[in-house]
Image (spheres, rainbow, N blue to C red):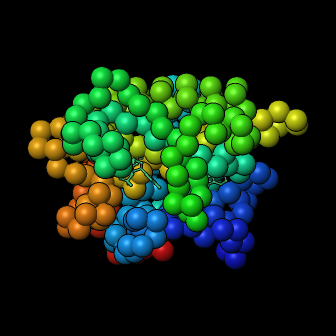
Amino acid sequence: MKNKKKLYEGKAKILYKGSEPDTLIQYFKDDATAFNNKKKGQIPGKGVLNNFISELIMTRLKEINVPTHFLRRLNMREQLVKKLEIIPIEVVVRNIATGSLVKRLGIEEGKVLSRPIIEFYLKDDNLNDPIISEEHIIVFDWASPNELEEIISLSSRINDFLTGYFFSINIRLVDFKLEFGRFWKSDEASILLADEISPDNCRLWDLKTNKKLDKDRFRQNLGEVDKAYKEVAYRLGVLSEKEFKKVIKNDL
Ligand code: ADP
Ligand code: UDP
């Protein structure tokens, strides 16, 4: 589709009007940001890899009846999704202590949690995405009690499924961030999983060596960032090295 109408440009993706009613095109950029936009850079090929990785994960989740916005991949960097009313909450699921949890609460780095923790952050860059409680979500009407219950139940199912899925390719799913939105049909809204699931918003550690295979390599200047994303894509079987090289040569 030529001359697509740009609706929004974010830090990692661009949203265009979709070709079908109530749809959007997510275009995956190579841009990377961290620390609320203070650190900026590019990870060559990241957009292509995240498009393929997120397609695979959303497809697997659909197969276990987790409702998602994903419709189909359009090309190397774009996918068609259902247009949602995004709930302004970032849901973080944690299996192992690291990142802000360790900093905030002084928990030992790398501690395996006795059960997964689900946290909520307000999606607001101006306020630095502050952590919030279920009470805030209800009182300030960011989601209804029923919607919140559905979001928690889906997040927990997604974590159970993905933990096993990544384990099967020798990767520890340490933590990850999810977004949800409302899909309106007549006067009824259903909750769907939105955005993307990729090494941009998951922490993925190699099972044997604990090598970081995610955006922490960018955040912490660990080097070989693109190599880590490719490693995840190859292990998931979404793109062979040969295919990826061909794509990058003729990139959009
Ligand atoms: P950010 O907005 O944080 O910079 P991105 O660059 O990834 O993040 O932009 C993608 C934007 O698209 C996010 O704000 C996300 O909430 C929004 N989004 C994701 N999926 C959908 C959807 N199905 N419908 C509407 N908006 C969506
Ligand atoms: N995360 C994300 N977007 C954000 C904040 C966090 O995708 O704006 C992801 C991050 O990649 C990690 C998880 O959520 O997988 C938990 O992040 P944490 O709270 O530890 O934040 P950080 O250490 O990145 O500040």
Q: Residue at x 51, y 68 (%)?
A: 11
Using the rendered image of the protein, determine whether residue 56 is visible from the camera's viewpoint.
no
Q: Residue at x 22, y 34 (%)?
A: 111
Q: Residue at x 40, y 65 (%)?
A: 34
The x, y position of residue 133, in whole percent, is: 56, 37
Q: Quadrant of residue 222?
A: bottom left
Quarter of the image where the N terminus is located:
bottom right
Task: From the viewer's side, name the closer residue of 35 and 48.
Answer: 35
Q: Residue at x 24, y 30 (%)?
A: 112
The x, y position of residue 35, in whole percent, is: 40, 65
The number of callouts visible is 0
Query: In the image, 187: left or right of 103?
Result: right
The x, y position of residue 187, in whole percent, is: 88, 35
Measured along the vertical axis of the image, is residue 25 above or below residue 140?
below
Using the rendered image of the protein, determine whether residue 44 is visible from the camera's viewpoint.
yes
Q: Quadrant of residue 8?
A: bottom right
The x, y position of residue 128, in whole percent, is: 51, 60
